[in-house]
Amino acid sequence: MGYQFAHFYTYSGAGSGKKGKKGTYTVSGCLGEAFREDGYTSHIENPEKKINLIYGNKENLENSIKNYQENFRDPRGHKLRKDGKCLMAGVFSWPPGTSETDFNAGNEKLTEWLKKEYGDNFRCAVAHKDEPFQRGDHEGETHFHTHFFIVPAANQNMKELHPGLKAKAEARANGENIIKQDLVYKWAMGDWQDKIHKELGEPLGLSRAKPKELREKRLSRREQKMLENMEESYNNFMAETQKKADEIIKKAKQKAIEITDKMIAQAEAIILEITDRRNDLLKRPPAEIQELLKNPDHLRKLADVREADIKAREAKQLEKRKQTKGHGR
């Protein structure tokens, strides 16, 4: 039994595109290789001159991409950036030994699945029969595979179509850290592989993975260990940060209490002093009060003495409050 191979990438319209064996991660490079344009077929000895369209056409595909680039607006009303993703292109490959008859029949089922899965966003599909296997027991035999193209509508975000990006965005919105965001991205892409195998690969007689490949594990032991170490470092960092923040808050509260105590002590001392002055004046004969009012120098000296009394009272009140709090603890 052959095994399933299916994947997809997202592409932007930015850049002129690098022409070569692997093309480029831009729309021009992707479509150039898929539609066998000059400059994008150096990796093929005898590229097909006739394009094997099995769904849609290149003109409508390019128009849908252009429409998305020109008319998309995010929730804030911003246009798509020049490097914004505007095309999701994938490949579904058939295993060595596949006949052309099985390939054509398989493409019919693939087209049906893509229509059901992506609806009007599924724009085009191209079958390739001109690339041989480069190595292994089947070197030189035809490597049948199909390119398919998904384009968002003008009112859609690419995350609505891409399961990995969608899962990552939801994790970010839920406050997950970057480690968890990357992890759920990988899980979502694995779920997509499971889905396309169950609904398409298995009916075509294809296995889920290569022989001896332990697909039941989403992460290798090394990846799992790295994840655990990263999470531990992140948690330690957050705990240390919280500890320092608590210490700063504690010191700030203590300082505020000290300032408040000092202000209260000052107020109490002033109130006592004013009360003492009033009582002192009330005890003096009226003639003596008139004499004091006639002698500003004497009043000034008396005020200096009183100010010293206030400071002494303030210190005494503050110390008394500290002792009271000490006994309370």
Image: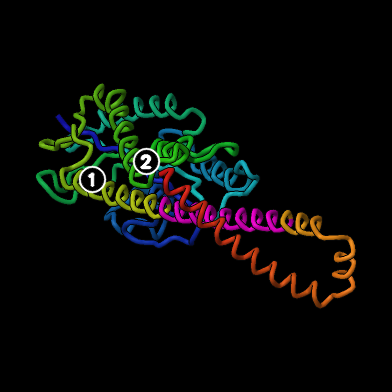
**Residue carrying label 1:** 228
Viewer-nearest residue: 107 or 220: 220
| Residue 273 painted magenta | yes
Q: Label 1 amino acid? A: Glu
**Residue carrying label 2:** 90
Q: Position of residue 11 (x, y in %)?
A: 44, 49
- Whether residue 125 is visible: no
Q: State which quadrant residue 107 falls in.
A: top left
Q: Position of residue 154 (x, y in %)?
A: 59, 39
Q: Earlier in the sequence, mark 2 or mark 1?
A: 2
Q: Position of residue 126 (x, y in %)?
A: 39, 39
Viewer-nearest residue: 327 or 258: 327
Main secondary structure found in the magenta portion: helix
- Residue 122 is tagged as none
| Residue 262 painted magenta | yes
Q: Which residues are magenta?
A: 246-274
- Residue drawn at x 48%, y 27% is 119
Above or below — where is 194 with respect to 86?
A: above
